[in-house]
Image: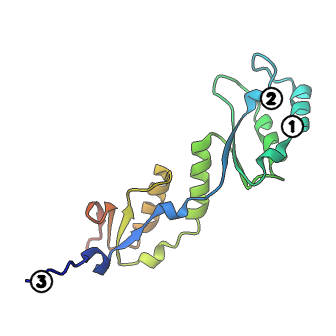
Amino acid sequence: MSDEIINRVANSSLEVVDLEELYVEGIRNLISIENFLEEGGVLVESKFREKLNSFNWSIYSNNYVAVYCSKEILVPKWAELLFINYLSPYVKDVVIGNLDDLEKFLFTRKLLKFDAKKYKDKTVMIKGCSNKPVPQQAMGMVISMLLPYVKKLSYGEACSSVPLFKKQL
């Protein structure tokens, strides 16, 4: 009997998809529309535009920004869209929504370039643990993209994965 330790995972044909590798590095900011409204959450168009025009948008240079308004305050859609106009020259990307929406957007953009075909007829595991936030939506997207191609699909870690799909022969 040999005392040599054999790494069966490294020697297997298992392909690992690590969504953490798709994480977009960069500073994220949340801007509240409410900070640009009059007291009581009222939008007075002339004052709103004046505040937007005089604000120093360069503080968000090279950042990712989410423009948010709480559900308690009703603002017209054009008010949200004006933020994009002011932020676009400075930021890497901007979305209307919260920071979770921003993260989903960034992952979706990366997944649009994901080549699921390279996993054709392979045993694939979607890595479960990560140090960076991976939206559940991204997990769902990658699974949908892989299903038409893979032979087997699981989720987790090689030592303890959960089977998700096995192609019927």
Q: Quadrant of residue 66?
A: top right
Question: Disc 1 marks which amino acid?
Answer: Phe
Front residue of 20/164: it is 20
Front residue of 36/118: it is 36
In the picture, the disc for residue 55 is 1
Q: Nearer the viewer, mark 3 or mark 1?
A: 3
Q: Position of residue 29 (x, y in %)?
A: 68, 43
Labelled pair 2, 1 in contact (Cβ < 8 Å): yes
Disc 1 crowd, CA 10 A, few/some/many (<14, 14-19, 20+): few
Q: Going from the N terminus, do you reach mark 3 or mark 2 first?
A: 3
Is residue 97 depicted above or below 135 in this figure? above
Quarter of the image for the N terminus: give it. Answer: bottom left
- Which structural element holds mark 2? helix
Q: In the drawing, does residue 158 fall left or right of residue 17? A: left
Q: Position of residue 144 (x, y in %)?
A: 44, 61
Q: Quadrant of residue 16?
A: bottom left
Q: Nearer the viewer, mark 3 or mark 2?
A: 3
Q: Position of residue 61 (x, y in %)?
A: 78, 51
Question: Disc 3 marks which amino acid?
Answer: Ser
Looking at the image, the residue that sits furthest to the front is 3
Residue beneath disc 2: 36
How many angstroms separate mark 3 from mark 2 (CA)? Answer: 71 Å
In the picture, the disc for residue 2 is 3
Looking at the image, the residue that sits furthest to the bottom is 2
Labelled pair 3, 2 in contact (Cβ < 8 Å): no
Q: Position of residue 124 (x, y in %)?
A: 36, 70
Disc 3 crowd, CA 10 A, few/some/many (<14, 14-19, 20+): few
Residue at horizontal 54%, vertical 69%? 114
Is residue 159 depicted above or below 118 in this figure? above
Quarter of the image for the C terminus: give it. Answer: bottom left
How many angstroms separate mark 3 from mark 1 (CA)? Answer: 71 Å
- Which structural element holds mark 3? loop
